[in-house]
Image (spheres, helix red, strand yellow):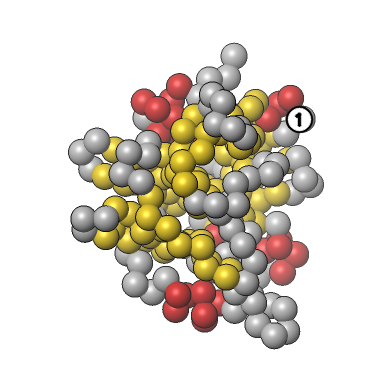
Amino acid sequence: MPSIEGLFTNTREFLKQNLLIMLGTMPTTAGMHAFAFEDGAAAEQKASRKSKFFWKSDYDIQVWNVRWVQGNRGGVPAFWLPYAPNTKQRSIARKDAPFLLTASMTGCSFGAVDRPGLGLEVNHVNYQTMDGVLDESRMKGEIAHCTHRLHQDKYRERARGKAITDIGKQAVMGATVVGVNTPRGGWKLWAQQWENTDGVRYVYHELLDL
């Protein structure tokens, strides 16, 4: 029986072996919200993990669909940072928040920096040019002050140290950003890099430390 217990006891190890996918309607405002973690098998979702050893085959891992529990009735509490097209979503994660979640990264940039006396500033950035393509230079500039940064050139254009040059493959690459607020070390941030091959099947490439 799949369990999310490891999310609370050893978050980094849990994120290595369990892929989180943001699904459904999510809050449009930043703040504390509740989320349910549903077994992806019920929706016929599957994921395989790339072995770090080239001679070993891929292996299956657990998929969890993360859904917003509207009205905060039960679920896992987390600070949520929303996404909006052609803008920057910025907020300060509450100091009492145990986890941080944001919308799936499919071309956007994410940035975070500690603000002494305030907390963790978090940013989810999406800008497009007049031609409708991602404005990467502007997005990088908007979070240049952040000490933790994730741009698409790290999760869509490269995987496990190798360049992804195929535009079609880049289009199905994405990342799930997760943060945990540790009692002594403060916020720890990661990004799960994934490839959505057919809508329900994922390849989990790497857990990136931010």
Above or below, 173 against 167 in this view is: above
Please tell me which residue is depicted at 42% across the width and 71% down the height of the picture: 143
Residue 168 is left or right of residue 96, and the answer is right
Please tell me which residue is depicted at 72% across the width and 78% down the height of the picture: 132
The secondary element bearing badge 1 is classed as helix
Residue 127 is left or right of residue 101, and the answer is right
Residue 80 is left or right of residue 42, and the answer is left
Residue 6 occupies quadrant: top left
Residue 70 is situated, as x and y percent measured from the top left of the image, at 62, 34
Residue 178 is left or right of residue 49, and the answer is left
- Binning the other alpha carbons within 10 Å of mark 1 as few (below 14), some (14 to 19) or many (20 upward) gives few
| Residue lying farthest to the front in this orientation | 71
Which residue is at the front of the view, 94 or 19? Answer: 94
Residue 207 can be seen, yes or no = no
Check disc 1 and report the residue beneath it: 43
Residue 85 is situated, as x and y percent measured from the top left of the image, at 64, 66
Residue 144 can be seen, yes or no = yes
Residue 189 is situated, as x and y percent measured from the top left of the image, at 39, 49
Residue 159 occupies quadrant: bottom right
Check disc 1 and give the amino acid type. Answer: Ala
Image quadrant occupied by the N terminus: top right
Q: How many marks?
A: 1
| Residue lying farthest to the bottom in this orientation | 130
Please tell me which residue is depicted at 70% across the width and 49% down the height of the picture: 196
Residue 97 is situated, as x and y percent measured from the top left of the image, at 37, 39
